[in-house]
Image: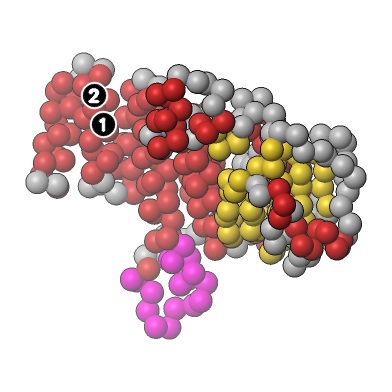
Amino acid sequence: MNNGETETNTGDGGNLPEVGDIISFDLKGYVLGSDEEITDILSPAIVSSMTQSPTQQQQPSHFLNVKDWTIKLGDADLPPALEMTLRFLSMDPRGGVVRSRSKYMYGLTGRRRPAGTNKEQRSTSNDDESDESSFIVPPNSTIECSVVIKTIKPAISLTLEDAILCAKSKKVIGNDSFLHGDYEKCLRLYNSAVDLLVGQNVPEIEADACAEGESNDNRQNAQFRKSRIPIVVDCLNNTAMVQYKRKEFGSVKDACSKILDKWDDRNQKALCRIVQASVELADFEGARSVLSKAIKFHP
């Protein structure tokens, strides 16, 4: 597929995923530079070598390296270039390659390094907003991603384990979005992860309540219920942190209350954030009450 802006080699042309499918994949991303041509679709021989590393003489900058991400195709968790690439990739062990303008990954502004990194500090001290050292992916650059799809499952076959993997990937992508200041996207991802895990219809069976003779389904349900708790708590705490930065203090209290009421009544982060949000809302009596609980549980 080649439209002059994005070029994809789709592997062996086998069965392609459909919107709604659950896809697990590995991904490596490189910045090739601002003067790289987007040419015709690459030959299979070149694709085979490029899925291992991009053209050697280009010495590209490596900006992304992930393994075992699991997403639901169509949820828009990924940048547009990657989302579109997955729709045209088959399960070829060599993988496939997408070469795209950076605007289809991170928009017209590129992707800056998170604040606090050494290169970002040096760029700030130089007062040069266009200094490419302050970018992970500079504007108007060309990027290349090699993708290997490992599994494709229809959504109807979603297992409890798949739900955990999808939620973990949503949280990781959400954390990355937060680091780069995309608060709308990270909130959407955190909420989506929580909805996915809470929405699974599993019986109320505790993991330690399963006797030796219990069915395998009961054991899986109990393990799922246990495994989802830290993910849900993390996503709700992260949601509260984003809302605090946005000065949405009522929403901070709502998110933290969900943690304390249902998932972990002694969670230190949730207790502390309710205190902070209550102070911001001038609810000093409420802040004092929650602070007393926090001191009791975490002296």
The residue where tag 1 is placed is 274
Q: Which label was assigned to residue 278?
A: 2
Q: Which residues are magenta?
A: 208-224
In this rendered view, identify the residue nearer to me: 210 or 73.
73
Q: Nearer the viewer, residue 260 or 85?
A: 85
Q: Residue furthest front?
A: 57
**Helix, strand or loop status at disc 1:** helix
Q: Is residue 92 visible?
A: yes
- 3 on left or right of 258: right
Relative height, residue 193 to residue 116 (above, below): below
The label shown at residue 122 is none
Q: Please tell me whether the stretch drawn in magenta is mainly helix, strand or loop.
A: helix
Give the residue at x 43% y 66%: 222
Query: Most extreme residue toward the top, as rendered?
Result: 282
User: Residue 28's spot in the image, x, y percent?
Assistant: 64, 53
Residue 125 drawn in magenta:
no
